[in-house]
Amino acid sequence: MSDTVVRKATWSSRTTFLMAAIGCAVGLGNLWRFPYIAGQNGGSAFIMVYLGFVFLLGVPLIMSELAIGREGKLSAVETMKRLVSQGYSRVWMYIGWISILVPILGLSYYCVIAGWSVEYIFKAAMGQFTGVDAAGSGAIFQASQDNVLGSVIWFSLFLFATVTVISLGVKNGLEKAVKIMLPALFVILVFLAIYAMTTGDSAGAIEFLLNPDFSKLTPRAILEALGQALFSLAIGVGGLITYGAYLPDEVSLPRSAGMIAIADSLVALLAGFAIFPIVFEYGLEPGEGPGLIFATLPIAFGQMPGGILFGTLFFLLLSFAAFSSTVGMLEPIVAWFVDKGKSRIKMAWSSGVLAWSIGIFMVLSFNVLATFEPLNFIPLYEGKNLFLIMDYTVANVLIPINALMIGLFAGWAMKNEMAERQFGFAHGSKEFTLWRISTKYVATIAISVTVLVMIFGMDAVLGALNIVG
C-alpha cells in the first residue's frame, strides 16, 4: 500500500522529525504539571513509577501512533479511512475523529495558560516579583486573571503566533520553529537546573527526587503516574499520527519512539532540578498544586540572587515548551483540510479563529464567568466552570479514551504485516512479541483502569479493586 500513496510533505531529516515529535510531547505537562504532581505524591518513588510507565507503555504506544500515521501518510482521519478501506473495522475511525477533536479543544484552553507564561516573562523582567510575599504573589496572579482585556490579548497573541507558523507549512513553518525552540528550550533548562542546584537547596532536591520512599507510594499515586505519563507524552492527542505521516520509510520507529520518551523524561527531570532546589531553599510547599508555577515560584524569584534573570528565563522556557506543543496541536487539524485539497493558509487561519472563538470562553472562566458552572447536574463536572470542564474533558476523558483505542488497535487489530513493515521486527521475534504484549494486554488494562477512574472516581475504582487502605 505504501508504494501507492503520494506523500504531501516529508520531514527534511530524521533529526528534524525528532525535534518536532519531542516538541509535540514536551510542553506544559513536563514543566507545569509534572513538578506539582510529583510534589503531591512524594517525589522520587512517584517519579520511578512514572518513568516505568513511560517506557513500558509510552514507547510501544508512540511506536503505534507513528506506525498508523506512516502507514496512511495522511491526516489522522484520512489515514484511518484508508486503513478501513484495507479491511480494518470502521470502529477504528474514532481514533481519527478524536485525534481531530482533542487538538481543537485542547488548543482553545492550552493557549490560555500559555498566554500567562508569556505575560509572566515581562512581569519577571520588570522586577515585579522582587521582595514579593505569598499574598503579593497571589495578588499579582489574581490581577492577571481578572484583567479581561489583558488575558484576551495574551491568549490571542499566543494562538495566532501558532497559526502563523502552521500556515507556512511543514518545512517553512513547523520545521524552522522547532529547530530554534527545542535547542533553546534544552539550553535554558540545563542552565536553570545548574543555577538552581548551585544557589538553592540541592541536598533537599536530590533527596526528594532521587531517594525513593516507597511508603509514600499509594495506589492513587500509581494511577496519577500513569495518567501523567500519557499526558506528558501527548499520546492520543493526534500530533504523533500526523507527524508520522510525514516520516520517510527508512526511519526506525522503535528507535525514534525511544528517543522521544528519553527526551521527554529528561525534560521532566530537569524541570524538577530547576524547581525543587528553589522550593526547598525558600520553604515553599512542593505539593502546592497547579499554582506552583504562577503563584508560588515567583515568591522565590523575588528573593533569590539573580531572581530577575532566573524568573525571566524560566517563563521564557515555559513559553517555548508550550509553543512547541501548540503547533503540534494545530497541525493535525490543518493537515486534515489539506488532505481534502483546501488551502493550508486559509485552513490554518480558519481553524485558529474556531479555536479562538471557543477559547474566549476559557479566558472568561477566570473572571466574568468564573462562577458559571453549567454542568453541575453531571457528577463528573460538578463544581467546574467552563475552563475546568474543558480541561477535564480533554485531559481526563478524550485523551485516555483515544490512547485506549490506539492500544486496542495496535494490540488486537493491527495486522502482523503492517507491524513488520513499520517496525522492522520479524513476526515472532522477541522485540515483536514484547511490543504486542505491551499494547495488547498491559496498555489496554492500565489505560482501561485510568478511564474508569475518570468516569467513576478514583476511590470507587480502588474500592472495586479491593486495594483501598
Image: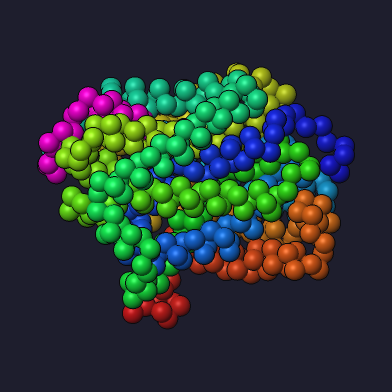
Q: Position of residue 425 (x, y in %)?
A: 79, 59
Residues shaded magenta = 112-135
Q: Position of residue 339 (x, y in %)?
A: 72, 30
Residue 437 sits above or below residue 143 on the image: below
Q: Position of residue 129 (x, y in %)?
A: 18, 34
- Kindly tell me whether residue 257 is visible in this rendering: yes
- The image quarter containing residue 124 is top left
Residue 416 sits above or below residue 463 on the image: above
Observer-nearest of 90 and 44: 44
Left or right position of 169 against 107: right
- Kindly tell me whether residue 79 is visible in this rendering: no
Give me the residue at 45% from left, 65% from top. Answer: 48
- The image quarter containing residue 70 is top right
Observer-nearest of 263 and 391: 263
Quadrant location, the C terminus: bottom left
Instruction: Kindly give the residue lying farthest to the front in the view shown.
Output: 198
Residue 129 belongs to magenta span = yes
Quadrant location, the N terminus: top right
- The image quarter containing residue 438 is bottom right
Give me the residue at 75% from left, 68% from top. Answer: 430
Left or right position of 327 against 6: left
Residue 98 belongs to magenta span = no
Tally of marks: 0
Give me the residue at 34% from left, 37% from top. Answer: 314
Colour convention of the picture: rainbow
Give me the residue at 15% from left, 33% from top. Answer: 130
> What secondary structure prevails in the magenta region?
helix
Residue 227 sits above or below residue 85 on the image: below
Observer-nearest of 94 and 132: 132
Q: Position of residue 398 (x, y in %)?
A: 52, 50
